[in-house]
Image (cartoon, rainbow, N blue to C red):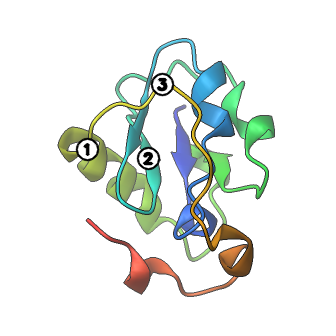
Amino acid sequence: MPFVVTENCIKCKYTDCVEVCPVDCFHEGPNFLVIDPDECIDCTLCEPECPIGAIFPEDDVPAGQEGFVALNKELAVAWPVITVRKEGLDDAKEWEGKPDKLRLLER
């Protein structure tokens, strides 16, 4: 069961998770990260590294965020792999935990 990056990552994009991934399954967009479900080996290392709790096993994605399963798969094909930690977005702290951020996703 692959892991999924969910809504809380939008406009934050902390990358602590990418450094611990042994198979480089994270992909980076302008203001969001995704996990390639075909590359993810379900190692569980990324989930506790996310400082804002935006990563979940596919079967445990919060209610109302099920669409992020397909979104991760779709965007992983289009976006480049990221393997090195970077600083979060400049205004990330302001966006942590805010609801309804999907409309702010930059592709």
For the residues marked 2 and 1, what is the alpha-carbon distance in whole angstroms?
9 Å
Between circles 2 and 1, the one closer to the viewer is: 1
What amino acid does circle 1 point to?
Answer: Trp
Question: Which numbered disc flags the more N-terminal residue, 3 or 2?
Answer: 2
Q: Which residue is mark 1?
A: 79
Q: Which residue is mark 3?
A: 83
Q: Are marks 2 and 1 in contact (CB under 8 Å)?
A: yes
Classify mark 2: residues with Cα within 10 Å, few (<14), some (14-19) or many (20+): many
Q: Are marks 3 and 2 in contact (CB under 8 Å)?
A: no
Q: Position of residue 51 (x, y in %)?
A: 79, 51
Classify mark 3: residues with Cα within 10 Å, few (<14), some (14-19) or many (20+): many
Q: Position of residue 100 (x, y in %)?
A: 55, 87
Which label is found at residue 34?
A: 2
What amino acid does circle 2 point to?
Answer: Val
Q: Quadrant of the C terminus?
A: bottom left
Question: In this image, 19 relative to 70: left or right?
Answer: right
Q: Is residue 63 above or below residue 12?
A: below
What amino acid does circle 3 point to?
Answer: Thr
Taking the spot 76% from the left edge, 58% from the top edge, the residue there is 52
In this view, the residue in front, 7 or 60, is 7
Circle 2: element type: strand
